Amino acid sequence: MLMNGLDKDGWVSIITSTKELDINLKKSKLESNGIEAIIFNHQDSMLKSLNDTDFMVSLYVHENDIENAKKIIE
């Protein structure tokens, strides 16, 4: 399965939220600490235009970085 152009194998979601800004800030913090992170936005652009509901956004890191990533974003 592809996720933002990357193969999902080996990537693990460490946080999911409806607050996209918060997820983006956490991603930046991880990257500034040398941990590659990607965001997967669960929204469908058509659904968003039809519905005002908040959509989930997940932050993924490689499985080898889970422990360090969680420490950094706490």
Image (cartoon, rainbow, N blue to C red):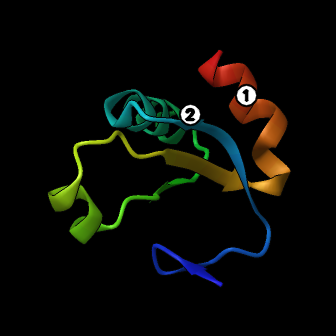
Give the side of residue 25 with respect to residue 64, left or right.
left
Q: Quadrant of the C terminus?
A: top right
Callout in the foreground (2, 1): 1
Image location (x, y in percent) of residue 6: 56, 78
Residue projecting furthest to the left: 49
Element class at badge 2: loop
* Residue 54 to residue 74: above or below: below
> For the point 65% across and 22% down, which residue is it?
72
Residue with the most extreme top position:
74
Residue bearing mark 2: 33
Q: Taking 56 as reference, is 73 left or right?
A: right
Asked whether, in this view, residue 34 is left or right of residue 18, the answer is right
Measured as percent of width and height from the top left, residue 69 is found at 70, 34
Task: Report, in whole angstroms, how far the alpha carbon at label 2 lies from the one at label 1.
Answer: 12 Å
| Residue at point 82%, 55% (across, down) | 63
Residue depicted at x 55% and y 47%: 58
Q: Is residue 74 above or below residue 15?
A: above
- Callout 2 touching callout 1 (CB < 8 Å): no
Q: Residues within 10 Å of mark 2 (few under 14, many from 20)?
A: few
Label disc, if present, on residue 70 of the rendered structure? 1
Q: Amino acid at mark 1?
A: Lys
Count of numbered labels shown in the rendering: 2
Q: Residue at x 31, y 42 (%)?
A: 53
- Label 1: element kind: helix
Q: Disc 2 residue type? A: Asn
Q: Quadrant of residue 11?
A: bottom right
> Whole-percent x and y of residue 29?
47, 29
Q: Quadrant of the N terminus?
A: bottom right
Of residue 35 and residue 1, the one placed in the foreground of this image is 1
